[in-house]
Amino acid sequence: QVQLVESGGGKVQAGGSLRLSCAASGSIFSSNTMGWYRQAPGKQRDLVATIRSDYRITYADSMSGRFTISRDNAKNTVFLQMNSLKPEDTAVYYCKLRQLQLDYWGQGTQVTVSS
């Protein structure tokens, strides 16, 4: 089994920054992809960014520039640095780990950006 625990969400004013963390534990294989997704109220869950264990990164088209994903393989942890936040970034942010064609999700962390 795999467990994912996110942290770092909260409330911030527009223009501010937050750094999300997601720590994975359990049966983690060395080859995996970790990523961040977000879901705003009434909307579908959308990709923010993913990072493979070989550090190859993919960003959703609208996310690069303000958001930076990184990871610490030794700690099975993925980070999302979010800068210049906008009210439209308000959402629940979910961490996902994919390995052996299986997806594992965290419980989500709320990010609220006020104008």
Image (tube, grey):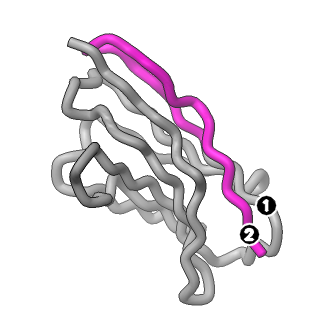
From mark 2 to mark 1, how far is it between C-alphas? 6 Å
Of helix, strand and loop, which one carries label 2?
A: strand
**Residue drawn at (68%, 49%) of the image:** 5
Crowd tier of the residue under label 1, counting other residues whose Cα lies within 10 Å: few below 14, some 14–19, many 20 or above: some
Residue furthest to the bottom: 101
Q: Main secondary structure of the magenta part?
A: strand
Q: Is residue 41 left or right of residue 68?
A: left
Disc 1 residue type? Ser
State whether residue 40 is above or below residue 24: above
Disc 2, disc 1: CB below 8 Å?
A: yes
Q: Which residue is mark 2?
A: 2
Q: Which residues are magenta?
A: 1-21
Q: Residue at x 72, y 74 (%)?
A: 30
On the image, the x and y values in percent for residue 115 come to 20, 12
The quadrant where residue 67 appears: top left
Q: Amino acid at mark 2?
A: Val
Q: Secondary structure at mark 1?
A: strand
Q: Residue at x 39, y 55 (%)?
A: 37
**Is 10 left or right of 32, judged from the image as shown?**
left
Q: Inspect this view and state whether residue 72 appears.
A: no
- Which residue is labeled 1 in the image? 25
Residue 37's tag is none
Label 2 neighbour load within 10 Å: few <14, some 14-19, many 20+: few
